[in-house]
Image (cartoon, rainbow, N blue to C red):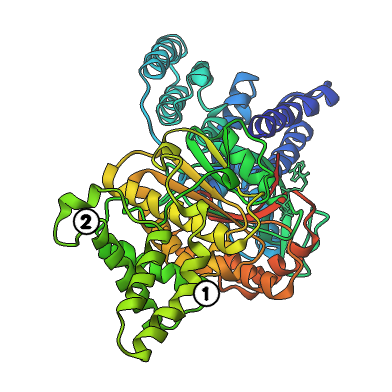
Amino acid sequence: MQEIRHGIFLAIVILGLILPRLILAGYPLDSVYVSFGIFVSLFVDAILSYILFGSIIVSLVYFLSILSLIDILNYMNLVNIYILFPYSMGLAVALFFGMIIRRRYDDEFLSSLRKINITFNFYTILLSLTFLIFAIIIYFYIYNSQLFLIGSIIAFLLLLISGKKEDSPLILSSWIFLPYLMSQIGSNGEEKGICIGEIIGILKRSSFSSSKISTNSNYKWISYRSKFYINLERNKNFNIIIVGGSGSGKSHLAKNIIRKGNFHFLIFDIHGEYDVNAKRIDISKISINPLSLFGQSPRQRALEVAYMIKSIFNLGSLQTIDLSNIIVDAYGEKGIFEDDERTWNLPPPNFRDVLMLLEKKKKLVTTSQELNKIQSLEPYIYFLATNTFMDNSINLYDLISDDYVLDFSKVTIPEIKYVIIETILRSILAYMYISGQSNFRKMIVIDEAPFILSKESGEQLMERLFAESRKFGFGFILISQSVEYVRKLIPNTSYVFALNIVDPTEIDFISRLIGGQDPDIFKAIYNSLPKLERGLIITRDILRDEIILVRSN
Ligand SMILES: Nc1ncnc2c1ncn2[C@@H]1O[C@H](COP(=O)(O)OP(=O)(O)OP(=O)(O)O)[C@@H](O)[C@H]1O
């Protein structure tokens, strides 16, 4: 897109310089008519440059580029102080109307500077140095033009920053392609990452909209075409949240990210819809023991398990403490003690052992109060004393080392499903602490995130995972139809992708989240979200700090 814009502009400039001379062929070059024709074309060039590139800086550099073309076309007798007049007039007119339409000044070139990622490349340096030497020979020794030489030196420096060795020959063109080289220095950071679609609009203050999604606000979607990359490595964490109504394209987007990302993944596939290239585990066929210690102390693990059961069955605080104490006793029965770390590696008890311990304790109690206490816990332990929770039939740490899809579609009891998910997530957290800091290597996808986040213990666990996982090389993609459940995780999230949403409360929250404080931006997002077609995303582009409309592919 950038290349086309610059190509079209330069073609129009050349045409504007040649045409007046061709049409007025009978008149000398310095006649009033030819000069007037060229002045008009310079006035138009200035307006056009501002419309196309949205930057006063680029337009001013183009003035030097046009001067070079005038020189090459042998119009040098036109180069006097007056030539600045039509161009600066054109630029002033464009700026004036631009400010009226946009109501503020945004400089595209200055915005693109935020994306610069300088990485010096040996071949680029070598190639550009070669062309710079040629430029010095041509402009210094042959043409003796210091102005052209300065243009080539600046082009050389821009090339070093952009690192695009294929552009090296443009050093010889001095000022002519300098604006193009300027546009390239901001695009090098963009290309690293995962391309998940195409930006088709940018939300800007404008009187005109060039998109069919109307916003009924002072902010409108202005057409734009550019690939959209997400760059997890360059962000503060590797976490992504996808929100949208049913069928809006949430899972499709998550699959797209994991297929293109250069990392291992683990998918909690609640409905069995992830047809990706990975090892599949039918969760209904495995067993997992939530009382496994995962390197933690028995008291710590007993508290976590009791808290998890409390969150599922709404136990009271006293019941939760009693349950935790019983589980600690069950560890003791297996020879696992809080103050002897060597015993933590022994085989842990399971819920059947806890049930048997309850039976034993029932026989030993002396008061009816104590008996009631034990009996009140029995139904929950009885419910969990199933084959599913007997032992670990898979090595949970293996899940970290390869690509896995955990298919939960055949696990029909929600409470059982919940215990399995929380236990696996806890084992991952434990793994992180055991293995220590690491570079990015694993993405965990949780579809139907409210399933885990609606429980108190699940929410706290996810908050911890979101806050701490980056240093251990883990990232999360959470998918939710509702913003309510994910809102506490947003401060530790790099990308929030909003797809079509129709529920007014949800729209309200997500518009505030992406739009910030500005009521006009809020209104524009609020009115756009319910109109999004399947696969269309509204998000904030962190690199540009702009709100963008993306068509996911
Ligand atoms: N960008 C896209 N391009 C092409 N097809 C898409 C795109 N996004 C979604 N689809 C298709 O639309 C259908 C629904 O998408 P998807 O399953 O991702 O929606 P969802 O939001 O996850 O729905 P649910 O919440 O009901 O699970 C799928 O058949 C998917 O292939």
Front in this rendered view, residue 23 or 322: 322
Horizontal side, residue 151 vs residue 431: left or right: right
Badge 2 local density, few (<14 within 10 Å), some, or many (20+)?
A: some
Count of labels in the image: 2
In which quadrant is the N terminus drawn?
A: top right
Q: Is residue 211 above or below residue 272?
A: below
Residue type, label 1: Phe
Residue 34 drawn above or below residue 213: above
Nearest the eye: 111 or 472? 472
Label 2, secondary structure: give it: loop
Q: Earlier in the sequence, mark 2 or mark 1?
A: 1
511, 292: nearer the viewer: 292
Indicate the position of residue 501 as horizontal and vertical percent values: 73, 63
Which residue corresponds to the image point at 24% horizontal and 47% vertical from the top-left? Answer: 345
| Horizontal arrangement in the rendering, residue 339 relative to residue 84 (left or right) | left
Badge 2 amino acid: Gly
Q: At x 47% / y 23%, what residue is drawn? A: 148
Work out whether 15 lies above or below 348. above
Establish if 453 lies above or below 350: below
Picture quadrant where residue 350 is located: bottom left
Between 128 and 245, the residue placed more toward the observer is 245
Residue 213 appears in the picture as rendered: yes
Q: Where is residue 532 in the image (x, y as percent from the top left)?
A: 77, 57
Pointer 2 residue Cβ closer than 8 Å to ligand 1: no
Residue corresponding to mark 1: 313
Residue 420, percent from left and from top: 50, 54
Question: Looking at the image, do the residues carrying marks 2 and 1 touch, with CB atoms under 8 Å apart?
Answer: no
- Secondary structure beneath dot 1 equals helix
Residue tagged 2: 335
Query: In the image, residue 396 lies at what x, y percent?
Result: 42, 43
